[in-house]
Image (tube, rainbow, N blue to C red):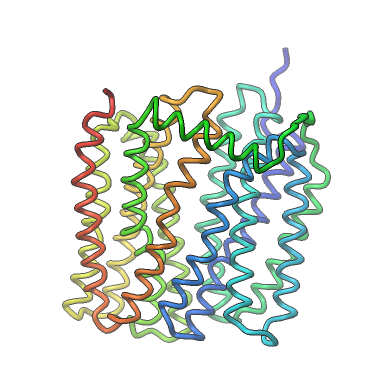
């Protein structure tokens, strides 16, 4: 039997569409919050808007996975890319003529919600297009595209925004989504319609109930790990999301143009840390035991301290920025190794018929604390702007305590 090509016509179109669509999404999700922060100068408003935007992604990710199993995946991708293009066209038309804060909140919520509903269809389409020999390679390619868009998007967005402002980014994003949607029309993904007598909300309720019952009755250790991740996202992930732009664009004394570019580079370095974590997991950390994961969390927390110390000591802005780059790179590296190990553990202990539902539920629950953390840090940075290092020290101490406390959970994980 002749082996199937990895880059068939349909998979190639998906790859190209992903590159274009994710790049458009990445530059928007970088530029829109940054514009709001620059114009209002309010970390608390910036954090609140970012938190509101994050909620639809949390809610729609599991629903997107269920829809992807019951609707033609090609149609989902085409419709959502066209919808995003129209959304940004409408945003461009309304920009400057309606309340800026309301416009940004609504637009970012829709962007994040669409992203949450979009990605499950892409991931679920791969098994339909690939044989077993190429499945791992195809998934790796899609995941690398996602990581690279997070790396290139902010860097390119920072340069565009710094030199030309927001308008060119809006125009580029509209073209990206429109071009991606047109390309996806020509993809052929095998689809067999399922006959479901229950409505979508009953299906979601049933799937979530089944997954929750498995955690509660069969694998309570998963619930404990989710609590640890929630707490870590509350204190560390939220600090990075809010603190990085606030410190670089407001606490440090750079011009608006330069600070936008430096923030873009910092976002790219963060994504590069994620790529490094993935590579290290597959090589140096391949045999790293799940029982030692508390070490990864603890080191991620400790790496916040150099940022706080450099700011407390009043070192030069460029030196503080260099410390930030090194720290966030290493934090993201350790966080990615932990995430991959935790996801592998989840896949091992979960029956095949529950894996999709469990992954959606775990991701949803793990992220639910992040919006709250963003709001808290927005308020703290608003009130301690001149002493931002205090906020970072608080985040470091709380995260380290969580890392150390998690040792007890991870030490018995094999039991």
- Compared with 137, 176 (above or below) is below
What x and y, as percent, mark residue 337? Answer: 36, 42
What x and y, as percent, mark residue 350? Answer: 45, 26
- Compared with 129, 183 (above or below) is below
Residue drawn 75% across the image and 32% down it: 197
Residue drawn 23% across the image and 61% down it: 396
Can residue 185 be seen in this snapshot? yes
Q: Quick one: quadrant of the C terminus?
A: top left
Give the camera-side residue of 362 and 13: 362
In which quadrant of the rendered view does residue 172 lie? bottom right
What x and y, as percent, mark residue 224? Answer: 32, 39
What x and y, as percent, mark residue 184? Answer: 78, 47
In which quadrant of the rendered view does residue 405 lie? top left
- How many discs appear? 0
Report the side of 125 relative to 294 (left or right): right
In which quadrant of the rendered view does residue 53 lie? bottom right
Residue drawn 49% across the image and 68% down it: 50
Residue drawn 78% across the image and 29% down it: 195
Report the side of 273 relative to 53 (left or right): left
Q: Quick one: quadrant of the N terminus?
A: top right
Can residue 337 be seen in this snapshot? no
């Amino acid at each position: 039997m002749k082996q199937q090509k990895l880059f068939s016509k349909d998979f190639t179109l998906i790859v190209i569409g992903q590159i274009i669509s994710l790049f458009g999404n990445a530059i928007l999700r970088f530029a829109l919050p940054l514009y709001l922060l620059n114009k209002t100068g309010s970390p608390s408003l910036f954090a609140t808007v970012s938190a509101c935007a994050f909620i639809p992604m949390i809610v729609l990710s599991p629903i997107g996975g269920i829809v992807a199993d019951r609707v033609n995946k090609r149609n989902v991708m085409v419709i959502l890319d066209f919808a995003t293009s129209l959304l940004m066209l409408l945003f461009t038309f309304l920009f400057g003529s309606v309340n800026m804060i309301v416009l940004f909140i609504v637009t970012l919520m829709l962007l994040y919600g669409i992203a949450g509903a979009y990605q499950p269809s892409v991931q679920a389409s791969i098994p339909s297009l690939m044989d077993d020999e190429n499945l791992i390679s195809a998934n790796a390619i899609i995941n690398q595209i996602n990581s690279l868009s997070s790396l290139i998007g902010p860097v390119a967005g920072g340069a565009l925004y710094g030199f030309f402002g927001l308008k060119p980014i809006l125009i580029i994003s509209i073209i990206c989504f429109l071009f991606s949607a047109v390309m996806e029309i020509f993809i052929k993904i095998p689809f067999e319609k399922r006959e479901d007598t229950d409505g979508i909300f009953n299906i979601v309720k049933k799937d979530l109930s089944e997954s929750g019952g498995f955690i509660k009755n069969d694998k309570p250790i998963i619930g404990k790990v989710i609590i640890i991740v929630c707490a870590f996202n509350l204190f560390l992930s939220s600090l990075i999301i809010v603190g990085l732009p606030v410190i670089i664009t407001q606490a440090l004394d750079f011009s608006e143009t330069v600070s936008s570019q430096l923030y873009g580079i910092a976002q790219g370095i963060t994504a590069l840390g994620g790529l490094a974590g993935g590579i290290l997991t597959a090589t140096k950390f391949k045999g790293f035991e799940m029982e030692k994961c508390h070490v990864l969390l603890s080191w991620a927390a400790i790496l916040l301290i150099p940022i706080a110390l450099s700011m407390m000591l009043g070192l030069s802005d460029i030196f503080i920025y260099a410390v930030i780059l090194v720290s966030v790179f290493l934090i993201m590296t350790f966080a990615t190794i932990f995430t991959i190990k935790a996801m592998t553990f989840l896949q091992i202990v979960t029956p095949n018929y529950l894996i999709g539902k469990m992954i959606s539920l775990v991701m949803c629950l793990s992220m639910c604390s992040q919006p709250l953390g963003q709001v808290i840090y927005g308020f703290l940075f608003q009130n301690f702007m001149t002493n931002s290092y205090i906020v970072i020290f608080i985040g470091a101490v709380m995260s380290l305590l969580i890392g150390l406390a998690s040792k007890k959970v991870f030490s018995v994980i094999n039991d």
